[in-house]
Image (tube, rainbow, N blue to C red):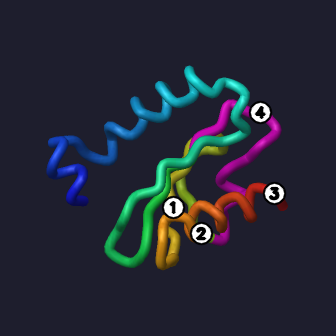
Amino acid sequence: AEDFEHTKTGEQDLLDVLDVVHQHAPHSRAIAIVYPADQGFRAVVHTHEPSLDLRRALARLGAFGSRNLVSCEIEARTSDEAIAYIRELLAD
């Protein structure tokens, strides 16, 4: 939240960031942006891989959105822990 205030941006601006990251890493299976939230972390996850259904893969996190773009909350102490959990769920 502090970063959003500092840069005068919001969560909706993360979609533009995801597009830029995908341009630089087009072969990535999924790209996640993880940032602090009230109770842990929030993530926006995007994929261009047709066989990957993010809504289903991240259902344990209460993911909402479409099969290729979701938002979810993660109870974790650190961002590294949150990312590791996303990776674990996407590996299943």
Q: Nearer the viewer, mark 3 or mark 1?
A: 3
Which image quadrant for residue 89?
Answer: bottom right
Q: Are the two marked residues, 2 and 4, in contact with CB atoms closer than 8 angstroms?
A: no
- Would residue 3 appear left or right of 91 to someone viewing this image? left
Q: Are the two marked residues, 3 and 1, in contact with CB atoms closer than 8 angstroms?
A: no
Disc 3 to disc 1, C-alpha distance:
17 Å
Q: Secondary structure at mark 1?
A: strand
- Position of residue 90 measured from the top left corner of the image (x, y, whole percent): 75, 56
The mark nearer the N terminus, 3 or 1, is 1
- Find disc 1 in the rendering and name its residue: 72
The mark nearer the N terminus, 2 or 4, is 4
- Would residue 28 appear left or right of 92 to someone viewing this image? left
Q: Are the two marked residues, 1 and 2, in contact with CB atoms closer than 8 angstroms?
A: yes
Dot 1, crowdedness within 10 Å: few (<14), some or many (≥20)? some
Of the pair 90 and 62, the residue shown nearer to us: 90
Q: Are the two marked residues, 4 and 3, in contact with CB atoms closer than 8 angstroms?
A: no
Disc 2 to disc 4, C-alpha distance:
21 Å
The mark nearer the N terminus, 2 or 3, is 2
- Find disc 2 in the rendering and name its residue: 61
Name the amino acid type tagged 4.
Pro
Q: Quadrant of the N terminus?
A: bottom left
Which image quadrant for residue 35?
Answer: bottom left
- Find disc 3 in the rendering and name its residue: 91
Q: Quadrant of the C terminus?
A: bottom right
Name the amino acid type tagged 2.
Leu
- Position of residue 44 measured from the top left corner of the image (x, y, whole percent): 49, 50
- Would residue 3 appear left or right of 65 to someone viewing this image? left
**Magenta region, residue range:** 46-60
- Find disc 4 in the rendering and name its residue: 50
Name the amino acid type tagged 1.
Cys
The mark nearer the N terminus, 1 or 2, is 2
